[in-house]
Amino acid sequence: MKVSEIAKAASVNPDTVRFYTREGLLHPQRNPDNGYKHYGSEDLTRLQFARKARQLGFSLAEIQSILDQADHDNSPCPMVRDVFEHRLAEVETRLAELEALRDRMRDAMAAWSTMPDGTPDGHTICRLIEHWDDSPERQTETLSAKGGQDDE
Amino acid sequence: MKVSEIAKAASVNPDTVRFYTREGLLHPQRNPDNGYKHYGSEDLTRLQFARKARQLGFSLAEIQSILDQADHDNSPCPMVRDVFEHRLAEVETRLAELEALRDRMRDAMAAWSTMPDGTPDGHTICRLIEHWDDSPERQTETLSAKGGQDDE
DNA sequence: CTTGACCTGTGACCTGCTCAAAGGTTTTAA
DNA sequence: TTAAAACCTTTGAGCAGGTCACAGGTCAAG
């Protein structure tokens, strides 16, 4: 397969294929006639793997390591498992943050839509975000208590 | 306040303060004697706001816009609200993705720990990740059916 | 007065791509 | 057959959002 073909097969930008090749994730052969890169089915597997792993939040360096380990799989590679566990922990942390965030934002939107004057002004939003890490329960209170102390 | 002081007050890297200043988010005065930047409490407010907003996933450009609107708050700035709504939608999307991801990863870890041979090898993980977007129900099946077709 | 900790601006580096330029090759169609 | 379109190559720049390093100016303590 040529660059565009493998790119199409994996639904990625051909430049991404070239980039991954430069980075050493893919190992195409060379056509000696014209210097074109020739990718095999193994490269497609690696590329698809890499794309999935990227979606999971793995870095290219991590993917590189995993792929390298898998290449000569004589090693039991506990490192791969470590990376995976580490990623899972990060995902869970991020997830919790995002959930808290979403709840806050929903509260904020709800508070705005029930505000007497209807449209929130910039200051309202700024104050809301400024106090973002106040205790969650006090968000709407913060919102409605918009006449508080000024900073200048 | 000087750069390091405001940076410390907001728990950010001084270089981030300089960067934000270059980008026009902060407006320090200049000490004519030595050319040092002098930040006021308003800048600290803006900086803290900016950091919170970044955590919420707002881009610096968005923050810039919000801050500008808030500066001369004569405008009702529906744009700020639009940005916020848009962000909320993105957060919810990302959240759903991460939840699916976490579930998959947990399943994978569980499957590994109950595997007869104990330690998963690189190929096992590769196969797992390769088939990541198969129908979710079939994940553990994919795992246990590791004797399938090989790609080499 | 020297030392060390700050300040200044400028510019390089990082990740994970994406795009553009300049030139060679292959395919397609008239 | 040949011209044009559509590929291929390498190189290098650009994006966000910082971070860090460099060279030189400034300031407070001893």
Image: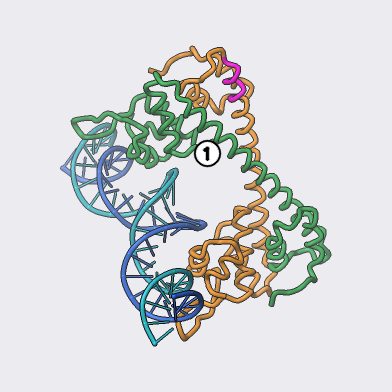
Chain colours: A orange, B green, C blue, D cyan
Q: Is residue A138 above or below residue A91?
A: above
In the displayed structure image, the side of residue B30 where residue A68 appears, left or right: right
Residue at 79 percent of width and 63 percent of height: B118
Please check the rendered image and state whether residue A112 is part of the magenta-colored stretch, yes or no.
yes
Q: Which residue is mark 1?
A: B57
Q: What's drawn in magenta, residue-wise?
A: A108-115
Asked if B25 appears above or below B113 in the picture, the reply is: above
Could you say where residue A147 lies in the image, as x and y percent from the top left?
Answer: 49, 12
Q: What element does badge 1 sit on?
A: loop
Image vertical order of residue D29 relative to residue D25, above or below: above
Give x and y (percent) for residue C7.
Answer: 28, 38
Residue at the image point whose x is 34% and y is 25% from the top: B40
Kind of residue at badge 1? Gly
Image coordinates of residue B147 in percent, x first then y, are 80, 71
> Which residue is located at x 37 percent, y 17 percent?
A152
Residue occupying image coordinates x 18% and y 31%: B33
Q: Is residue B127 magenta?
A: no
| Residue A25 image position (x, y, % from top left) | 55, 68
Q: Residues within 10 Å of mark 1 (few under 14, many from 20)?
A: some
Q: Nearer the viewer, residue B33 or B98?
A: B98
